[in-house]
Image (cartoon, helix red, strand yellow):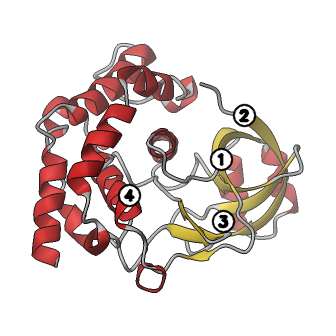
Amino acid sequence: MLLRTVAATRYVTPLREGGSLPAIVEADDDGMYVLKFRGAGQGPKALIAELLAGELARAAGLPVPEIVFVELDPELARTEPDSEIQSLIGASAGLNLALDYLPGAVTFDALAEQPSADLASAVVWYDAFVTNVDRTPRNTNMLLWHRRLWLIDHGAALYFHYNWDSYLEQSKTPFPRIRDHALLGFASKLMDIDADLSRRLTPTIIAAIVALIPDDWLQGDAMFANRNEQRIAYERYLLARLEPPRTFVEEAIRARSAHV
Protein backbone atom coordinates (compact mmCIF):
# COMPACT_ATOMS: atom_id res chain seq x y z
CA MET A 1 0.00 0.00 0.00
CA LEU A 2 1.36 3.40 -1.03
CA LEU A 3 0.22 7.00 -0.72
CA ARG A 4 1.17 9.62 -3.26
CA THR A 5 3.54 12.40 -2.20
CA VAL A 6 3.10 15.89 -3.62
CA ALA A 7 4.88 19.18 -2.95
CA ALA A 8 2.95 22.26 -1.85
CA THR A 9 3.53 25.11 -4.32
CA ARG A 10 1.06 27.72 -3.07
CA TYR A 11 -0.66 28.49 0.21
CA VAL A 12 -4.21 29.43 -0.82
CA THR A 13 -6.26 30.15 2.30
CA PRO A 14 -6.59 29.04 5.92
CA LEU A 15 -9.65 27.11 7.11
CA ARG A 16 -10.16 28.90 10.39
CA GLU A 17 -13.05 26.72 11.50
CA GLY A 18 -10.48 24.01 12.27
CA GLY A 19 -8.79 24.23 15.65
CA SER A 20 -5.38 23.36 14.17
CA LEU A 21 -5.70 25.93 11.36
CA PRO A 22 -5.62 23.60 8.34
CA ALA A 23 -5.34 25.27 4.96
CA ILE A 24 -6.16 24.85 1.31
CA VAL A 25 -2.96 24.53 -0.70
CA GLU A 26 -2.08 23.94 -4.32
CA ALA A 27 0.46 21.24 -5.13
CA ASP A 28 2.84 20.43 -7.94
CA ASP A 29 0.32 18.03 -9.50
CA ASP A 30 -2.04 21.02 -9.98
CA GLY A 31 -4.37 19.57 -7.37
CA MET A 32 -5.90 21.37 -4.41
CA TYR A 33 -5.68 19.84 -0.96
CA VAL A 34 -6.73 20.47 2.63
CA LEU A 35 -3.38 20.43 4.40
CA LYS A 36 -2.98 19.31 8.03
CA PHE A 37 0.20 20.77 9.52
CA ARG A 38 2.59 18.68 11.59
CA GLY A 39 3.58 21.83 13.47
CA ALA A 40 0.04 22.52 14.69
CA GLY A 41 -1.57 21.81 18.05
CA GLN A 42 -1.18 18.10 18.72
CA GLY A 43 1.76 17.68 16.37
CA PRO A 44 2.55 14.51 14.42
CA LYS A 45 0.17 12.35 16.49
CA ALA A 46 -2.82 14.16 14.98
CA LEU A 47 -1.43 13.37 11.52
CA ILE A 48 -0.92 9.73 12.47
CA ALA A 49 -4.54 9.54 13.62
CA GLU A 50 -5.69 11.22 10.40
CA LEU A 51 -3.65 8.80 8.31
CA LEU A 52 -4.56 5.59 10.12
CA ALA A 53 -8.22 6.37 10.68
CA GLY A 54 -8.68 7.65 7.14
CA GLU A 55 -7.15 4.61 5.49
CA LEU A 56 -8.97 2.25 7.86
CA ALA A 57 -12.22 3.90 6.80
CA ARG A 58 -11.28 3.41 3.15
CA ALA A 59 -10.45 -0.26 3.79
CA ALA A 60 -13.86 -0.63 5.43
CA GLY A 61 -15.51 0.67 2.27
CA LEU A 62 -16.37 4.13 3.58
CA PRO A 63 -15.97 7.26 1.44
CA VAL A 64 -12.89 9.31 2.40
CA PRO A 65 -11.17 11.85 0.12
CA GLU A 66 -7.78 10.77 -1.17
CA ILE A 67 -5.06 11.18 1.46
CA VAL A 68 -1.62 12.29 0.32
CA PHE A 69 1.70 13.18 1.91
CA VAL A 70 2.70 16.78 1.29
CA GLU A 71 6.23 18.15 1.29
CA LEU A 72 6.14 21.67 2.67
CA ASP A 73 8.92 24.17 1.97
CA PRO A 74 9.16 26.82 4.72
CA GLU A 75 9.85 29.37 1.96
CA LEU A 76 6.08 29.42 1.36
CA ALA A 77 5.80 31.47 4.56
CA ARG A 78 7.61 34.44 3.01
CA THR A 79 4.54 35.61 1.09
CA GLU A 80 2.15 35.28 4.04
CA PRO A 81 1.37 38.49 5.96
CA ASP A 82 -0.20 36.64 8.91
CA SER A 83 2.48 35.92 11.53
CA GLU A 84 0.54 32.95 12.93
CA ILE A 85 0.48 31.31 9.51
CA GLN A 86 4.14 32.12 8.97
CA SER A 87 5.03 30.37 12.23
CA LEU A 88 2.85 27.38 11.41
CA ILE A 89 4.43 26.88 7.99
CA GLY A 90 7.91 27.26 9.44
CA ALA A 91 7.21 24.72 12.19
CA SER A 92 5.81 22.25 9.65
CA ALA A 93 8.70 22.07 7.20
CA GLY A 94 9.02 18.60 5.70
CA LEU A 95 6.37 15.93 5.39
CA ASN A 96 2.76 16.73 6.22
CA LEU A 97 -0.62 15.20 5.40
CA ALA A 98 -3.53 16.39 3.28
CA LEU A 99 -6.90 15.34 1.96
CA ASP A 100 -8.15 16.00 -1.54
CA TYR A 101 -10.12 19.25 -1.58
CA LEU A 102 -13.76 18.74 -2.58
CA PRO A 103 -14.80 22.03 -4.23
CA GLY A 104 -18.40 23.00 -3.62
CA ALA A 105 -18.94 20.41 -0.90
CA VAL A 106 -21.39 21.34 1.87
CA THR A 107 -21.70 20.16 5.44
CA PHE A 108 -23.69 16.96 5.61
CA ASP A 109 -27.00 17.40 7.45
CA ALA A 110 -28.10 13.98 8.74
CA LEU A 111 -31.67 15.12 9.37
CA ALA A 112 -32.08 16.61 5.91
CA GLU A 113 -30.33 13.81 4.01
CA GLN A 114 -31.68 10.78 5.90
CA PRO A 115 -28.70 8.40 5.42
CA SER A 116 -29.44 4.73 4.85
CA ALA A 117 -29.34 2.35 7.80
CA ASP A 118 -26.41 0.49 6.22
CA LEU A 119 -24.31 3.62 5.75
CA ALA A 120 -25.17 5.11 9.14
CA SER A 121 -24.41 1.82 10.89
CA ALA A 122 -21.07 1.49 9.11
CA VAL A 123 -20.01 5.02 10.06
CA VAL A 124 -21.07 4.56 13.70
CA TRP A 125 -19.27 1.19 13.88
CA TYR A 126 -16.13 2.66 12.38
CA ASP A 127 -16.08 5.73 14.61
CA ALA A 128 -16.54 3.54 17.69
CA PHE A 129 -13.69 1.33 16.50
CA VAL A 130 -11.25 4.22 16.03
CA THR A 131 -12.61 6.11 19.08
CA ASN A 132 -13.46 9.18 17.03
CA VAL A 133 -14.88 11.84 19.35
CA ASP A 134 -15.53 14.28 16.51
CA ARG A 135 -18.70 13.24 14.68
CA THR A 136 -21.41 14.91 16.72
CA PRO A 137 -24.45 16.92 15.57
CA ARG A 138 -22.56 20.09 16.51
CA ASN A 139 -19.55 19.12 14.39
CA THR A 140 -20.35 16.26 12.03
CA ASN A 141 -17.09 16.23 10.04
CA MET A 142 -19.06 14.90 7.10
CA LEU A 143 -19.48 16.56 3.72
CA LEU A 144 -22.00 16.14 0.94
CA TRP A 145 -20.32 16.25 -2.45
CA HIS A 146 -21.86 15.09 -5.73
CA ARG A 147 -24.81 13.80 -3.65
CA ARG A 148 -22.57 11.49 -1.68
CA LEU A 149 -21.47 11.56 1.94
CA TRP A 150 -17.72 11.94 2.62
CA LEU A 151 -15.92 11.49 5.93
CA ILE A 152 -13.24 14.02 6.89
CA ASP A 153 -11.11 15.17 9.83
CA HIS A 154 -10.00 12.20 11.93
CA GLY A 155 -7.14 13.83 13.81
CA ALA A 156 -8.98 13.43 17.13
CA ALA A 157 -9.39 9.66 16.71
CA LEU A 158 -7.15 6.98 18.26
CA TYR A 159 -6.46 9.20 21.26
CA PHE A 160 -4.99 6.25 23.17
CA HIS A 161 -1.59 7.08 21.64
CA TYR A 162 -1.24 10.16 23.85
CA ASN A 163 -0.78 7.75 26.74
CA TRP A 164 0.72 4.39 25.80
CA ASP A 165 0.49 2.96 29.32
CA SER A 166 -1.61 -0.23 29.26
CA TYR A 167 -2.55 0.40 25.64
CA LEU A 168 -3.75 -3.17 25.11
CA GLU A 169 -6.11 -2.80 28.04
CA GLN A 170 -7.27 0.48 26.49
CA SER A 171 -8.12 -1.43 23.31
CA LYS A 172 -10.97 -3.11 25.17
CA THR A 173 -12.69 0.10 26.25
CA PRO A 174 -16.31 0.39 25.03
CA PHE A 175 -16.15 4.07 23.93
CA PRO A 176 -19.26 5.46 25.67
CA ARG A 177 -18.99 8.76 23.77
CA ILE A 178 -20.59 7.02 20.81
CA ARG A 179 -23.87 8.12 22.40
CA ASP A 180 -23.21 11.59 20.94
CA HIS A 181 -22.76 10.40 17.35
CA ALA A 182 -24.61 12.36 14.68
CA LEU A 183 -25.81 9.20 12.88
CA LEU A 184 -26.61 7.00 15.87
CA GLY A 185 -30.37 7.29 15.44
CA PHE A 186 -30.13 5.87 11.91
CA ALA A 187 -27.73 3.02 12.78
CA SER A 188 -30.22 0.19 13.05
CA LYS A 189 -27.98 -2.49 11.47
CA LEU A 190 -24.97 -2.41 13.76
CA MET A 191 -24.95 -6.15 14.35
CA ASP A 192 -25.04 -6.95 10.63
CA ILE A 193 -22.41 -4.32 9.83
CA ASP A 194 -20.15 -5.66 12.60
CA ALA A 195 -19.80 -9.01 10.89
CA ASP A 196 -18.96 -7.41 7.55
CA LEU A 197 -16.52 -4.69 8.63
CA SER A 198 -14.64 -6.82 11.13
CA ARG A 199 -13.90 -9.24 8.25
CA ARG A 200 -12.70 -6.48 5.96
CA LEU A 201 -10.08 -5.15 8.38
CA THR A 202 -7.71 -8.08 8.16
CA PRO A 203 -4.31 -8.26 9.90
CA THR A 204 -2.63 -7.85 6.50
CA ILE A 205 -4.56 -4.65 5.73
CA ILE A 206 -3.94 -3.21 9.19
CA ALA A 207 -0.22 -3.95 8.94
CA ALA A 208 -0.05 -2.27 5.52
CA ILE A 209 -1.82 0.85 6.81
CA VAL A 210 0.37 1.13 9.90
CA ALA A 211 3.47 0.74 7.72
CA LEU A 212 2.53 4.02 6.02
CA ILE A 213 3.44 6.08 9.11
CA PRO A 214 6.57 8.11 8.25
CA ASP A 215 9.57 7.60 10.53
CA ASP A 216 9.75 11.30 11.36
CA TRP A 217 6.27 11.22 12.88
CA LEU A 218 7.22 8.50 15.37
CA GLN A 219 9.14 10.26 18.07
CA GLY A 220 9.12 11.18 21.73
CA ASP A 221 7.61 7.99 23.18
CA ALA A 222 10.21 6.70 25.60
CA MET A 223 8.62 3.31 26.16
CA PHE A 224 9.62 2.19 22.66
CA ALA A 225 13.19 1.27 21.83
CA ASN A 226 12.71 2.13 18.15
CA ARG A 227 10.15 3.18 15.58
CA ASN A 228 9.41 -0.37 14.51
CA GLU A 229 8.34 -1.24 18.05
CA GLN A 230 5.94 1.68 18.00
CA ARG A 231 4.44 0.62 14.68
CA ILE A 232 3.95 -2.89 16.08
CA ALA A 233 2.16 -1.35 19.08
CA TYR A 234 -0.29 0.44 16.77
CA GLU A 235 -0.94 -2.85 15.00
CA ARG A 236 -1.44 -4.73 18.25
CA TYR A 237 -3.88 -2.12 19.54
CA LEU A 238 -6.02 -2.20 16.38
CA LEU A 239 -6.01 -5.99 16.16
CA ALA A 240 -6.87 -6.32 19.84
CA ARG A 241 -9.75 -3.89 19.39
CA LEU A 242 -11.20 -6.16 16.70
CA GLU A 243 -11.04 -9.30 18.84
CA PRO A 244 -14.45 -10.53 20.01
CA PRO A 245 -16.32 -9.67 22.05
CA ARG A 246 -16.13 -6.17 20.60
CA THR A 247 -17.24 -4.03 23.49
CA PHE A 248 -17.38 -0.92 21.32
CA VAL A 249 -20.13 -2.54 19.23
CA GLU A 250 -22.06 -3.62 22.32
CA GLU A 251 -21.81 -0.07 23.66
CA ALA A 252 -23.02 1.43 20.37
CA ILE A 253 -26.02 -0.90 20.34
CA ARG A 254 -26.85 0.02 23.95
CA ALA A 255 -26.45 3.72 23.18
CA ARG A 256 -28.78 3.47 20.21
CA SER A 257 -31.41 1.62 22.25
CA ALA A 258 -31.39 4.49 24.71
CA HIS A 259 -31.43 7.02 21.87
CA VAL A 260 -34.56 5.83 20.02
Which residue matches tag 1?
66
Q: Earlier in the sequence, mark 3 or mark 1?
A: 1
Q: Residue at x 89, y 50 (%)?
A: 30
Q: Are marks 3 and 1 in contact (CB under 8 Å)?
A: no
* Image position, residue 138 (x, y; %): 39, 80
Q: Which quadrant of the rendered structure holds the C terminus?
A: bottom left
Q: Does residue 165 appear in the picture of this structure?
A: no
* Image position, residue 126 (x, y; %): 35, 50
Instruction: In the rendered view, tell whether residue 111 sits above or below residue 82.
Output: below
Mark 3 or mark 1: which is in front? 1
Q: How far is mark 3 from mark 1, CA to CA? A: 28 Å
* Image position, residue 23 (x, y; %): 69, 62
Q: Earlier in the sequence, mark 1 or mark 4?
A: 1
Q: What kind of element bears circle 2?
A: loop
Q: Are marks 3 and 4 in contact (CB under 8 Å)?
A: no
Q: Amino acid at mark 4?
A: Val
Mark 2 or mark 4: which is in front? 4
- In-image side of 173 versus 154 (left or right): left
Q: Amino acid at mark 2?
A: Arg
Q: What kind of element bears circle 4?
A: helix
Q: Are marks 1 and 2 in contact (CB under 8 Å)?
A: yes
Q: Nearer the viewer, residue 103 or 223?
A: 103
Res 110 quadrant in image: bottom left
Q: How far is mark 3 from mark 4, CA to CA? A: 35 Å
Q: How far is mark 2 from mark 4, CA to CA? A: 25 Å
Which residue matches tag 3?
84
Identify the mark at residue 4; answer none if there is no mark.
Answer: 2
Q: How far is mark 1 from mark 4, CA to CA? A: 18 Å
Q: Nearer the viewer, residue 104 or 62?
A: 62
Which residue matches tag 4?
123
